[in-house]
Structures are given as structure tokens and as C-alpha cells.
Image (tube, rainbow, N blue to C red):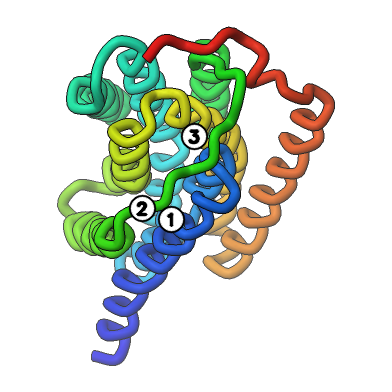
């Protein structure tokens, strides 16, 4: 009974709190930082901890590799939304992006688990999207959110974690992992930003998200490989170190290319 209560608190507290923090940070530090923060493995890490405690290490390790492969689907969502935003308003963009995510997820669920191929596919997908994303001259600051929006995002995060962990035994480990990073947070951020400020800040946000996915890939790959032989604590600790190391490397590379993401011409609204 105590374990069930602790798991419930874990499900409904950590991920919503993170989403609330990101929502408060975005207006101060801009859309690119918000996009990078969304790639932090807070939600996925929470789900993997719960799955380890409820379904076992092997199940959770497979889910971690599924989350790694899900980067391809997240990238499909991002490029679908961004390219549609050059011509259409957010409802059409959201439809195109979500169909891309769903189709990618269903196809990827048919593949065989392989950490090296999954990692290569994830990195390749992120690189392709970064090349194809519309470029912007400026990175405008995020607009303040309505008072009701942040609580709505937090509630959505809690529901997502509860649903995924509850139906995990039915979905199986790979599909559970593929659905763990479902872009609910991204959806919330981009549609409100797009509707209030137009597509340009959305492109900036998605660029930050894609760079963050390199680090997310490192986290998922490390956890997927280390979880069974070394246990939850070691896998999570090393996974977070891998996340931070790749984040630092990306930061150094971007520092050598100042303004590269903003040099191209302004996209049409």
C-alpha cells in the first residue's frame, strides 16, 4: 500500500512540477532555452523509474530504448509543424504534425530493438530536422502565458504519466517507450505561441528542442544499456551524466558558430 501511494505521488508530482518551471522560465530566457528544457528527461525518467519498480528492470530497459527511438517520431512532429507553419495556422499544423508522429510511432513499433541502430536513427533524424527547419533572424522572447495555461500544462503532464504507466503492461515495453516522450508539452507550447506570436518563435523553440534531443538520446541509450546489469540508481546517474556531457558538447559547438541559426532570411508567416 505504501509503495502504491509513493508511485502515485511520483506520477502526479514530478513531471507537472517540471512543466510548470519550464513555463515560468520561457518568458524570461526565450523560446530556444524553453525548447532545450523540454528535452530534459524529467518526464521520461519518471516513467522509467515507475516502470522499473512495477514491471521490472528488463521491461524498463526496453522502454528506455523505445524512448530513444521515439526521437525519430518527435523529429517528425517538429518538422511537420514547422514546415506547415510557413503557410497555415496552428490547427492545420497540429494535425499534420501529430499525424507524422503517429505514423512514425506505428512504423517504429514494428522494428527490432537494437541500441546502436536506434541511436544512429535518432541522431540522423535530429540532424535532418535541424537542416530543414526554417531559419530566423532573431530569437524573440516568449510572451507571458495566461494564468490558466500553466495549470493546464501541469495537469496534462500528470495525466500523461499516469496513463502511460497504467497501460504499460498492455502496450508492451517498446510501445510504452515510444509513447513516453509523446509531445504533449511541445503541443501546448507551440500552439499557444503560434496563435499569439506567429510562427517565428515556434521555429526558435523547435530548434532548441532538436538540439536538446541529442542529449536526450544519450540519456535513453545509457539507461537502456545499463539498467539491467547495474540497476536503477547507476543507470539513472550515468544517464544524467551522459545527458550533461552531450549538452556541454553541443553548447561548445554552438558557441563556435554564433548566430548560425538566425542567419537565414525571415520565413513567411
- Judge by depth and name the residue closer to the eye, 241 or 234: 241
Left or right, 202 with respect to 165, comes to right
Q: Is residue 53 visible?
A: yes
Left or right, 17 with respect to 266, comes to left
Label pair 2/1, CB-CB below 8 angstroms? yes
Left or right, 254 with respect to 187, comes to right
Residue indicated by mark 3: 205
Label pair 3/2, CB-CB below 8 angstroms? no
The residues bearing labels 3 and 2 have C-alpha atoms spaced at a distance of 15 Å
Identity of the residue drawn at 54% across and 41% down: 141
N-term-proximal mark, 2 vs 1: 1
Q: Is residue 221 visible?
A: no
Identity of the residue drawn at 30% across and 62% down: 147
- Judge by depth and name the residue closer to the eye, 74 or 176: 74
Identity of the residue drawn at 33% across and 22% down: 81
Residue at the extreme bottom of the image, as rendered: 2
- Secondary structure under badge 2? loop
Residue indicated by mark 2: 145
Quadrant that contains the C terminus: top left
Label pair 3/1, CB-CB below 8 angstroms? no
Left or right, 201 with respect to 130, comes to left
N-term-proximal mark, 3 vs 2: 2
Tell me the crowding category of disc 1: few under 14, some 14 to 19, or many 20 or more residues within 10 angstroms, Cα based.
Answer: many
Where does the image place residue 201, in percent across and percent down from the top left?
47, 31
Task: Answer above or below: position of 114 versus 238.
Answer: above
Task: Answer above or below: position of 129 versus 149.
Answer: above
- Secondary structure under badge 3? helix
Amino acid at each position: 500500500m505504501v509503495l502504491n501511494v509513493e508511485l502515485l505521488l511520483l506520477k502526479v508530482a514530478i513531471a507537472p512540477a517540471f512543466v510548470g518551471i519550464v513555463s515560468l522560465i520561457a518568458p524570461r530566457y526565450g523560446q530556444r532555452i524553453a525548447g532545450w528544457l523540454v528535452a530534459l528527461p524529467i518526464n521520461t525518467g519518471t516513467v522509467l523509474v515507475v516502470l522499473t519498480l512495477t514491471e521490472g528492470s528488463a521491461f524498463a530497459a526496453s522502454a528506455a530504448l523505445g524512448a530513444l527511438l521515439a526521437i525519430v517520431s518527435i523529429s517528425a512532429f517538429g518538422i511537420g509543424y514547422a514546415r506547415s507553419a510557413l503557410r497555415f495556422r496552428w490547427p492545420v499544423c497540429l494535425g499534420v504534425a501529430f499525424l507524422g508522429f503517429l505514423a512514425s510511432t506505428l512504423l517504429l513499433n514494428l522494428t527490432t530493438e537494437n541500441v546502436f541502430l536506434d541511436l544512429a536513427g535518432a541522431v540522423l533524424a535530429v540532424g535532418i530536422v535541424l537542416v530543414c527547419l526554417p531559419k530566423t533572424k532573431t530569437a524573440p522572447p516568449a510572451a507571458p502565458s495566461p494564468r490558466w495555461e500553466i495549470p493546464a500544462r501541469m495537469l496534462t503532464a500528470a495525466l500523461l504519466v499516469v496513463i502511460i504507466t497504467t497501460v504499460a503492461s498492455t502496450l508492451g515495453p517498446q510501445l510504452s517507450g515510444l509513447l513516453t516522450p509523446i509531445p504533449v508539452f511541445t503541443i501546448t507550447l507551440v500552439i499557444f505561441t503560434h496563435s499569439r506570436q506567429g510562427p517565428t518563435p515556434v521555429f526558435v523553440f523547435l530548434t532548441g528542442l532538436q538540439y536538446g534531443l541529442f542529449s536526450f538520446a544519450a540519456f535513453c541509450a545509457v539507461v537502456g544499456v545499463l539498467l539491467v546489469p547495474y540497476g536503477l540508481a547507476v543507470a539513472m546517474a550515468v544517464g544524467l551524466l551522459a545527458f550533461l556531457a552531450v549538452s556541454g558538447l553541443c553548447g561548445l559547438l554552438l558557441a563556435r558558430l554564433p548566430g548560425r541559426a538566425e542567419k537565414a532570411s525571415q520565413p513567411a508567416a
